[in-house]
Image (tube, rainbow, N blue to C red):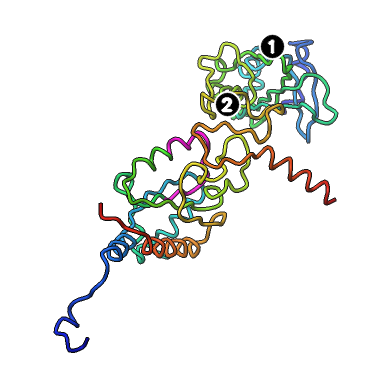
Amino acid sequence: MLFFEAHKILFEKFGSKILGLENQTGRQVVMVHADSIVEVVQFLKDEPMYAFDLLVDLSGADYSGYPEHVGPELCVSYQLLSTTKQTRCWIKVYLPMAEATIATLSSVYAAANWYERECWDMYGIRFTGHPYLKRLLMYEEFEGHPLRKSYPILKMQPLIPMRDAVDYENVARLNRADRSQGS
Amino acid sequence: MSGDPLYDVVLTTRLDKVLGWARKYSLFQYPFVTACCGMEFMATSASHYDTDRFGAAFPRFSPRQADLLMVVGTITHKQAPILKRIYDQMCDPKWVVAFGVCATSGGFYQNYCSVPGIDTFLPVDMYIPGCPPRPETVIDALLKLQDRIQDQRHSIV
């Protein structure tokens, strides 16, 4: 059975916690309320009809300034795969920038552990109940979360002093000024 | 002078020149390979292009035994202290080659994580452009580096 032929069951079971179903570039994406992500995913994993036994991906996104986007800016998206039924499921949860907190999935899927650490590192989304929420890619001394739109695009945080360091912010500004004069 | 009995058996030169000649043909390199340039580095070192012909290809995987640091690939700010430490562990005389655009200038990475060229914290002797550079470019750079080593001052103590 295709997953989304049966999505009504989700609405029936979780009611208003399922915020909607969207077609995004040909994929049916379920929008879930942040409060109940663990229950929904646990249900999708345990229910034999779905049997989504693999967490393929978990990633963040920052929709600040995205055209036609309304509502909370940060987003966590989950991709589940059923290895027995060969179906996939996409889930999205939107979170407000001011309080980017969501429950961890690491009790449901062990794979979520590092994904969530990466997501915390890059977007500053705090996963409550995570066993070891530490930066995965960046170093401990790094301040801020680099993939947030509010992070200055050329800001670097070197660990050792850089010789003849170029002021890249200024160079980029001058380049932009040059281009606008030329056009 | 052809009348001199030592003419055919004795070669006169300067000690400085001999040291330069010896050093340029026994470059022990430490390959600091972090990215895709490593493939091209392997191709250059392997039998087809064979940098060993020039006496410049013996890889040592300990910085204390090496005198040529090949920085092959993108260096991130997280990795920069490690590379600096490797450089500091090498004994004098030592040379540094920036292999590929990422090590040279950061390449197309200009963001929060990449170092915009290793020359922001290391003295670089030779830059090899290319993404990745062709083996011919690498060999050309090695020969140029050897010329430069020959012409350098080599103090004995």
Disc 2 from disc 1: Cα separation: 22 Å
Question: Where residue B55 appears, x then y in whole percent?
Answer: 33, 63
* Pointers 2 and 1 within a single chain: yes
In the rendered structure, are the residues bearing label 2 and label 1 in contact, judged by CB atoms less than 8 Å apart?
Answer: no
Give the camera-side residue of B29 and B145: B145
Q: Residue at x 26, y 64 (%)?
A: B15
Q: Which numbered mark, 2 or 1, is in the foreground of this view?
A: 2
* Quarter-of-image position of residue A77: top right
Q: What residue is shown with label 1?
A: A36
Per the image, the residue denoted by label 2 is A118
Q: Residue at x 81, y 19 (%)?
A: A71
Residue at image location 52% in from the left, 38% down from the top: A162
Give the left or right position of residue A62, taking residue B7 as reference. Answer: right
Q: Which residues are magenta?
A: B70-83
Q: Is residue B157 left or right of residue B35?
A: left
Q: Position of residue A64 (x, y in %)?
A: 77, 26
Q: Nearer the viewer, residue A18 or B134?
A: B134
- Name the subunit of mark 1: A
